[in-house]
Image (cartoon, grey):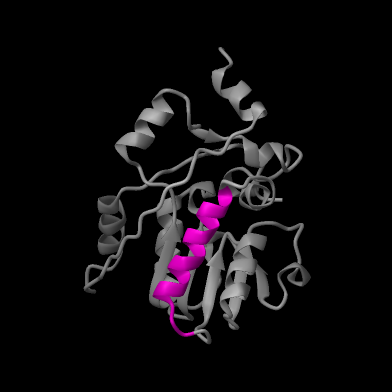
Amino acid sequence: MTLQDFMSRKSGMSDIRISFYQETIGKWIGNLDASILVVGGGETDRDVFHRLGFTNIEISNLDSRLSSDEFAPFSWSYQKAEELSFESNQFDYVVVHAALHHCESPHRALLEMYRVARKGAIAFESRDSLLMKILEKTRLSPTFEHLAVYYNDGKFGGVNNTEVPNYIYRWTEREIEKTINSYAPYAKHKFFYEYGSDEPFSTSVEKKSLFQKN
């Protein structure tokens, strides 16, 4: 179980995040027949796209424990986000929800999304805001994501779905634009941003680890 899926099952707070995800996808992708690749996907992604009525979805992730049966009626493939096996421009859209920060190179994964997308890429990730910096500084929000590993029996859920807790990479708008424009300076890009907020998700296990002195 990924941390994303754990939150959707166990925490009412995550309803805010899932609703924002669903509303944003519905707003920006109007064609229900569009070919869409979901990177770092899970059950939450499957449920969101199914509720919206999309039909041509391929969900990918880096979890050898899973199979295509778990993502029906959609397709599934084993893919590393930084090294997607698909052809350039193969999908109309590529989507990632709360997974780029699990990559060893979030920037490379973003560029792979750009490469295989024909019309656009949509990413849902934490923003590197002043408030987030304060929360992290005061240890009210973690710097490394331990929970995903904890709820995967200490064997999966970290960086590249390993047992190593991943650093939570948070983005700025300028950083996204510089990354894309450096990769494809020949193209004129349009960037759009939607903003939402959610309460920090933590359990007694995470809180104990956050405030434990070394």
Q: Is residue 48 visible?
A: yes
List x then y, in percent, for residue 148.
64, 42
Q: Is residue 152 left or right of residue 146?
A: right
List x then y, in percent, for residue 159.
58, 44
Q: Nearer the viewer, residue 165 or 137?
A: 137
Q: Is residue 99 left or right of residue 46?
A: left
List x then y, in percent, for residue 195.
36, 55
Q: Is residue 98 visible?
A: no
Q: Is residue 146 left or right of residue 191?
A: right
Q: Residue at x 21, y 73 (%)?
A: 188
Res. 61 image quadrant: bottom right
List x then y, in percent, for residue 139.
47, 24
Q: Nearer the viewer, residue 135 or 37?
A: 135
- Majority secondary structure of the magenta segment? helix
Q: Residue at x 74, y 71 (%)?
A: 68
Q: Which residues are magenta?
A: 14-31
